[in-house]
Amino acid sequence: MSRSPLTQTLAAASACVALALTGCSKQVTYGNPEQVETLTPEFGSTDLQMIASKMAQSLLASPVITGKPKPPLLYVAPVKNKTDEHIATQSITDKISTTLIQSGKVQFTAMADIPKELVDQLEYQNKSGLVNPSTAKPVGRHVGADYMLAGEITSIVKKSGSTKDYYYKITLKLANIETAVIEWQDEKEIRKGETKSLFGG
């Protein structure tokens, strides 16, 4: 029994929709986090890794670290983002501090990350009446940091025709908190280019 033109049209449309849905299916795969990322020219994971490696190794090799009899205690201030992009600068300092602390040559104060939580816990232990006094940690025992690590990231983006040039520079400084003397400073520069195909849109 032959189908009507309307039935045939609906069947063809259904087949096209099914094919389109199949063609739009996504496949999720795992990749190597150390692999160079070039999906876009904006600041990405590879830039973060290069910056963290350069800065951590530079600081560890400096006299301010190698010349100390015991690991100095650092306070990490948020890196200032002076670019036009949204950059998770906390990830930069976390990556650097992880490398530094794993070296065993540097210590960090937690006051840069969780000051309220630490103060709340001390108050809970000492003022709530719910904690055994013999196990409550006394107030006034926090160790003051020796140095403050701070910095900023800037960028310059230029375009000429179908080509874009991206330049990033991050500068970090280590200041002696007692004397306000900058005892270490370094920077990392990154340049990337993007050229759009005349036929790629």
Image (tube, rainbow, N blue to C red):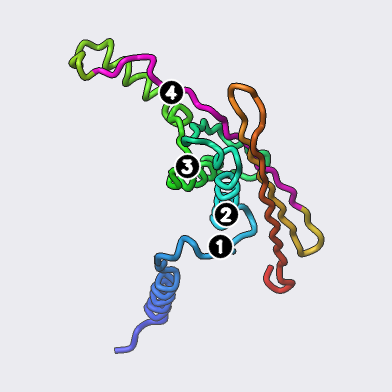
Q: Is residue 35 left or right of residue 42?
A: left
Which amino acid, by three-letter code, is at mark 4? Val
Quarter of the image with the N terminus is bottom left
Q: Residue at x 38, y 77 (%)?
A: 11
Q: Which mark is residue 143?
A: 4
Earlier in the chain: of badge 1 and badge 3, it is 1
Depth order, front residue of 20/77? 77
Sequence-wise first label, 4 or 2: 2
- In the rendered image, the quadrant that contains the C terminus is bottom right
Amino acid type assigned to the residue bearing label 3 in the image: Lys
CA distance for labels 4 and 2:
35 Å
Q: Which residue was labeled with disc 1?
A: 37
In the image, 157: left or right of 115? right
Disc 1 from disc 3: Cα separation: 31 Å
The residue at the point 72 percent across, 66 percent down is: 195
**N-terminal label among 2 and 3:** 2
The answer to whether mark 1 and mark 2 are in CB contact below 8 A is yes
- Residues rendered magenta in the picture: 136-157
**Structural crowding at the residue carrying mark 1, measured as other residues with C-alpha within 10 Å and reported as few (<14), some (14–19) or many (≥20):** few
Does the residue at mark 2 contact the one at mark 3 (Cβ under 8 Å)? no
Image: 171 above or below 128: below
Q: CA distance from mark 4 to mark 3?
A: 17 Å
Q: Earlier in the sequence, mark 1 or mark 2?
A: 1
Amino acid type at mark 2? Gly
Q: Which mark is residue 44?
A: 2
- Of badges 4 and 3, nearer the viewer stands 3
Mark 3 Cα shell of 10 Å, populated few (<14), some (14-19), many (≥20): some
Q: Is residue 177 left or right of residue 14?
A: right
Residue 25 picture quarter: bottom left
Q: Is residue 131 above or below residue 45?
A: above
